[in-house]
Image (cartoon, grey):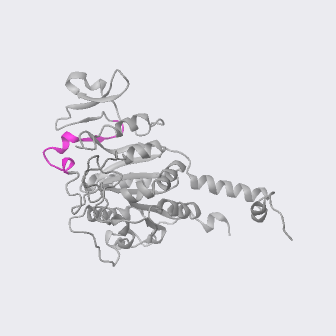
Amino acid sequence: MSETSQFPSLTLVPSADGPQSAKEFKSDQEVRWCPGCGDYAILAAVQGFMPELGLKRENIVWVSGIGCSSRFPYYMNTFGLHTIHGRAPAIATGLSTSRADLSVWVVTGDGDALSIGGNHLIHAMRRNVNLKILLFNNRIYGLTKGQYSPTSEQGKVTKSTPMGSLDYPFNPVSLALGAEATFVARTMDSDRQHLTSVLRAAAEHDGTALVEIYQNCPIFNDGAFDALKDGDEKEQHIIRLEHGQPITFGRERENGVIRAADGSIQVASVAEVGLDNVLVHDAHAADPGLAFALSRLSNPDNLDQTPMGIFRSIERPTYDTLLRDQVAKSKASGKADLAALIAGNDTWTIN
């Protein structure tokens, strides 16, 4: 059997049963998160979106680590793996590289991904493995009952930091862009329409797609993102990124992002600087410099000037494809001798 027929590409395995429904992606497991948890909204959005992929459920795999978000695979009527703390990207990498017929999704949290799992996350993004990574960020450790996390703001009072956290928080979007991820986005649990549109774009991307999702924890960090949800105030805080459009925000789009004389980017009044001087968002720019600068606009303490949307979406060969091509070339050369590779030139026999 040829490699192509043994591991068909995703485009070759659409569902033969016609259109699927969100109900078909719901498992028979009781969903057990705290009442009011943002995870419910994300789960509903994902289950509603999955039929759009047009794939057989047996060709979709959800991989998680440890944490509240990591219950996700139990609630999806697909294949799933609830794995080891922080190691979901590593396990998902093995699946993606060995099985081209699978759509592999990773669910992780700010603690799981950015603390014990930090190295696994950044190297998956650096390699551009064909994974879709959903990073639920509630800025707290929820499953272990309220310790500060790598994204908790400085001064955060928790059970493990009764006098306030001394750590400066990670910015997951900045981290992903620094690791040269080819798709980086941010959205929010309560904005179903925006969340779904970002998930759709991530699914269509060939390579690693990192989606940070601001997610409320009603028990240990309730209201962490209220500034971005208040009907009257949110438009003053959220900078909506749209490819090819001027970067403006505010109730009347009266504020814009400009390039300052020192090279930095700043927020200014559109009326004062003119719309022509407002930066136009380019999510497809090869250089991630502007996307990184945009990720630094947000103040972690008050969420003022928080960009939301797709920061970067570029094309680059995936690790999976490069690896399979290398294996195929090795086989074609007739020099693929695994035993010889293992033995190498530096082995000897002891009598």
Q: Residue furthest right?
A: 351
Q: Residue 242 colored magenta?
A: yes
Q: Residue furthest bottom?
A: 28
Q: Position of residue 245 (x, y in %)?
A: 32, 35
Q: Position of residue 72 (x, y in %)?
A: 36, 68
In the picture, the quarter occupied by the N terminus is bottom right
Can you say whether 229 is above or below 241 in the image?
A: below
**Side of 343 relative to 16 (left or right):** right
Determine the image quadrant of residue 203. bottom left
In the picture, the quarter occupied by the C terminus is bottom right
Determine the image quadrant of residue 62. bottom left
Depth order, front residue of 189/344: 344
Read off the magenta span.
226-244
Q: Residue furthest front?
A: 163
Say if residue 262 shows up in the picture. yes
**Side of 192 relative to 128 (left or right):** left
Q: Position of residue 126 (x, y in %)?
A: 52, 48
Determine the image quadrant of residue 99. bottom right
Say if residue 19 shows up in the picture. no
Can you say whether 298 is above or below 99 in the image?
A: above
User: Going 52% across and 60% down the picture, which residue do you hit?
Assistant: 90
User: Going 30% across and 24% down the picture, which residue do you hit?
Assistant: 277
**Side of 16 relative to 2 (left or right):** left
Q: Position of residue 305 (x, y in %)?
A: 25, 39
User: Going 75% across and 57% down the picture, which residue do you hit?
Assistant: 332
Q: Residue 87 colored magenta?
A: no
